[in-house]
Image: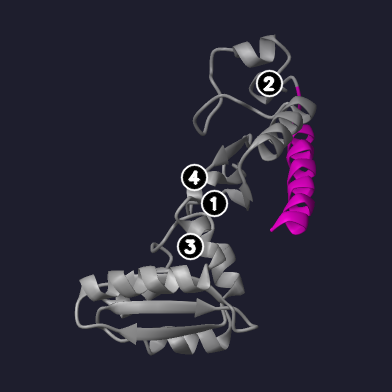
Amino acid sequence: MKRGARADVASAPAAPGVYVMKNAGGTVIYVGKAKNLRSRVRSYFSARGDERPSVPILRDKLRTIDYIETATEHEALILEDKLIKEYQPRYNSDLKDDQRYFSIKLTVNEEFPRIMLVHQRQDDGALYFGPFPSGAHVKTMVRRLQKKYHLRRCPGPRCRADGPCLYAQIDACASPCSGAVTKAEYDGRVKQVAAFLRRMESMTV
């Protein structure tokens, strides 16, 4: 979000109505309604506000926000529908169908990090990449990374304490908990995965 958009957020009225988000070229990219425009729009930019995976992409494209106040929330609903039909904003379909999006999570906040697909990001110290459209490509990519680097698969922040797990026994995990690889060796694998995901993200997002 650029400086102009920040000013628009600060000027949002505390009233029912419709907000119209535009990109740098003035194209409408999202239309939404709200009982309280100020509260709703601020939620897009607060740490614990709107957590839908494609919101970060919308924020990156956003440059200006226009507001249209209405007498009631019902009037806002009618106006929102009219404007969506008129402008066909891209992110209305994306944000309302966010189950199509995944982020890839690398749990570097754990001693032996894991890789996984998630729908929502959390402020937990892990690395997140994306969001990416879901489907065969991103799921296959995670499977290939797992197969190549054999990152830990056991659930939870810690490895099991009673020896190698089933994944290790079938050669699907490097088994750092059993000492099959050193911490330094395992961390090297994690760094390679993170580097690959950064390149993947730069080409996709």
| 202 or 184: nearer the viewer | 202
Q: Between marks 1 and 3, how big is the CA–CA gap? A: 30 Å
Q: Which mark is residue 40?
A: none
Q: Name the kind of residue labelled 4 in the image.
A: Gln
Circle 2 packing at 10 Å, graded few (<14), some (14-19), many (20+), is: many
Query: Sequence-wise, which precedes: disc 1 or disc 4?
Result: 4
| Dominant secondary structure (helix, strand or loop) of the stretch shown in magenta | helix
Q: Between marks 1 and 2, how big is the CA–CA gap? A: 23 Å
User: Percent from the top left, x then y, of residue 11?
Assistant: 38, 90
Question: What residue did someone put label 2 on?
Answer: 175
Instruction: Give the left or right position of residue 185, taking residue 59 as reference.
Output: right
Query: Sequence-wise, which precedes: disc 2 or disc 3?
Result: 3
Circle 3 packing at 10 Å, graded few (<14), some (14-19), many (20+), is: some
In this view, the mark in front (1 or 3): 3
Is the residue under label 3 in contact with that under label 1 (CB below 8 Å)? no
Say if residue 6 shows up in the picture.
yes
User: Percent from the top left, x then y, of residue 119?
Assistant: 50, 45
| 40 or 45: nearer the viewer | 40
Q: How many marks?
A: 4
Mark 4, secondary structure of its residue: helix
Question: What residue did someone put label 1 on?
Answer: 125
Mark 1, secondary structure of its residue: loop
**Residue 68 to residue 82: above or below:** below
Mark 3, secondary structure of its residue: helix
Question: What residue did someone put label 3 on?
Answer: 92
Q: Point out the image quarter for the C terminus.
A: bottom right
Q: Between marks 1 and 4, how big is the CA–CA gap? A: 23 Å
Q: Residue furthest left?
A: 72
Residue visible at 56% across and 64% down in the picture: 90
